[in-house]
Amino acid sequence: MCLSSSLMGTLMFVRKRSLLGETISHATYPGIVLSGFLGAFLGKLSLLSTLFLFLGGATLFAYFGLEIIEKIRNRLRIHFDAALCLILSLSLGIGVVFASRMQFISPLWYQQTQTFLYGQAATMNDAHVLIYGILSLFVFLFIVLRYREIELSLFDRAYGKGLGVPLLKVYRFIFLFLILSIVVGIRSVGVVLMAGMLIAPAAAARSFTDRLAVLLPLSAFLGIVSGFGGNYLSVLFSERGYHLPTGPMILLFAAIITFFSLIFAPKKGIVSRLIRMNRFRRRCQSENILKTLWKGGKKTSLSHQEILKWNALGPLRLKGALFKLQREGWVTKEGKGKVILTSDGLKKAEHLVRLHRLWELYLVSCLKADEERVHYSAEEMEHILTPNLETRLSELLNNPTIDPHQKPIPRGNEP
Amino acid sequence: MKKAIEIHQLSVNYDKTSALWDINVSIPEGSLVGIIGPNGAGKSTLLKALLGFVKPLTGKATFFGLPFQKVKSRIAYVPQKGKIDWEFPITVFDVVLMGRYPKLKGLKWYRKADKEAAWKMLARLEMESLADRQISELSGGQQQRLFIARALLQEGDILLLDEPFSAIDQATEELLIKLLKELKGQGKTILVVHHDLKTAESYFDQALLLNTSLVAYGECKTVLTSDNLARAYGKKGELLEEATRLSTAEKAGLLS
């Protein structure tokens, strides 16, 4: 279940249509309730027949839901998300109303339909597992066998059409398998929480990769881990005497994985980004200190106070920055509490000034910017320009030697 | 010279309004043609009709004497840049590789040859260093180059480009034109929907001036005369646009 829902959920996720998954899952509920009525009417049924009855009702109404959504979109010109929310809440409401009637008609069947609301994995039996396993297998095979077509039709349908990809067929199958994976899932996690299993693994995996081909197996993996984790935790807690239903536990597990991915993922996680932002800021501060030392006179040493006059730092931070600069070999101590550029630091500072003045010249001569305003932009850019950009700038401006403020542009390093 | 594209009495309607009317053109092999016309003239529609995306009211188009379905592997299409979701999880390399789709077999996983061809194409368009970037991390010009690289990888004999020169930087524009001229030299037939009248004459040898119906087709010098341009860009087209808008709105019950 987790496998199929995370796979199909990922496809919806990359198309930014996750709300559709939630809507479909809610749309199945009236179908399930009506199946319950039918079951009550038919009397005693075998376990397998009961299962198929419910699956049938769910699937049928899922398709109804999709059709209605399309009709609303095309005829009534309502924004897509609004139409989805409408169907979503309407379905659940209708289902609940019918279900409450059934409570009095047939409590037995009522119980059955309620297990689909929040899922009841504990009461699933082998028949369930077999059928769901087979359905999940189909989903898996579909994605593996038709991956290229899926990728093309989701990313660039116009181009895919030009290549002759059978777009309509692909979309039909995608929706078929989406519905199947939802129908498979609602018995375990329930109608209300199903959307979570569609979205969470995909959202978590997205923090780790930029490629769909990696996103799919990764989110499948995370989905399966959530499945096992949720089950395990549920069993663990029940041994201690707390009864925690499996479905929501799976979802919670998935949600926790997602939460940690968003925060701690190596490249895209928030923590990682904050660290890099901070590092960049400190680099800018250090580089600005080097420039200050250069401007103060290349052979003169400056004290901390003198440096602080030109750089907006706290004195403690300055100490830390200077310590690092010294350790890296750009400055040395001279005299009492004063620092001076080393020969390497001199070259580095000159390079920064070069980038700064090149950029100013670029803005003024090529983009007709105001001489007074270019300084701030250059203050930012001097820390960012790569050697490649530097070469291109210099070539574009014909290896200039004077900047807009008539100050000399230091020569670059010869290649 | 063989006729690469023959369009015969092609008319296309959107609802009840005419997007293209009675287009008759014969484009020889090895031509670099700019499709020029005002907004709503049906330029993109012409490409879409050629590719079979829209069903024409009447008429047909053949490529090397054959219908589209029989030669579609020889035709490469670069759609307008607008409709792409830039946040889709896909890298530059992945996108270029899509051009190899017609050549893939079985499970359609990429082979070494496919990947090498893609690398060479990226190198040709000066984009190797960008291979692992997610597509939102590219500049406008780089994005356009990417989609052209993908189309070129198909190694088609006919290239259809929809507004490739809009919203790109000077350097990319120059690179693109050089590339297109190279391809023309190799005998490819190229149709480019172009929005900028000023550059049309220097970029293309031939022009197809369009405003729902064909105004003129031929060498740029003979086609882009002030007479023809007045006919194509004149005020008469505006009425059609206004009427079309009213028609759509009325039919959707939006007007009282």
Image: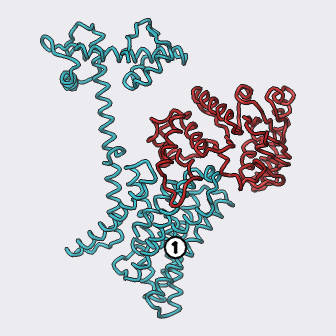
Chain colours: A cyan, B red
- Residue of label 1: A28
Q: Chain of mark 1?
A: A
Relative to residue A234, is residue A117 drawn left or right?
Answer: right
Q: Is residue A82 above or below residue A60?
A: above
Residue A315 point in image, percent of width and height? 21, 22
Residue A30 point in image, percent of width and height? 53, 76
**Residue shown at 18% from the left, 16% from the top:** A332
Residue A180 point in image, percent of width and height? 50, 71
Q: How many marks?
A: 1
Q: Quadrant of the N terminus of chain A?
A: bottom left
Q: Residues within 10 Å of mark 1 (few under 14, many from 20)?
A: many
- Residue found farthest to the bottom: A44
Q: Is residue A328 above or below residue A117?
A: above
**Residue shown at 55% from the left, 55% from the top:** B104
Relative to residue A378, is residue B159 drawn left or right?
Answer: right
Is residue A330 in view from this perspective? yes
- Residue found farthest to the left: A336
Secondary structure at numbered mark 1: helix
Relative to residue A30, is residue B211 drawn left or right?
Answer: right
Is B194 or A290 nearer to us in this picture?
B194
**Residue shown at 84% from the left, 54% from the top:** B58
Q: Amino acid at mark 1?
A: Thr
Relative to residue A403, is residue B53 drawn left or right?
Answer: right
Residue A333 point in image, percent of width and height? 15, 15
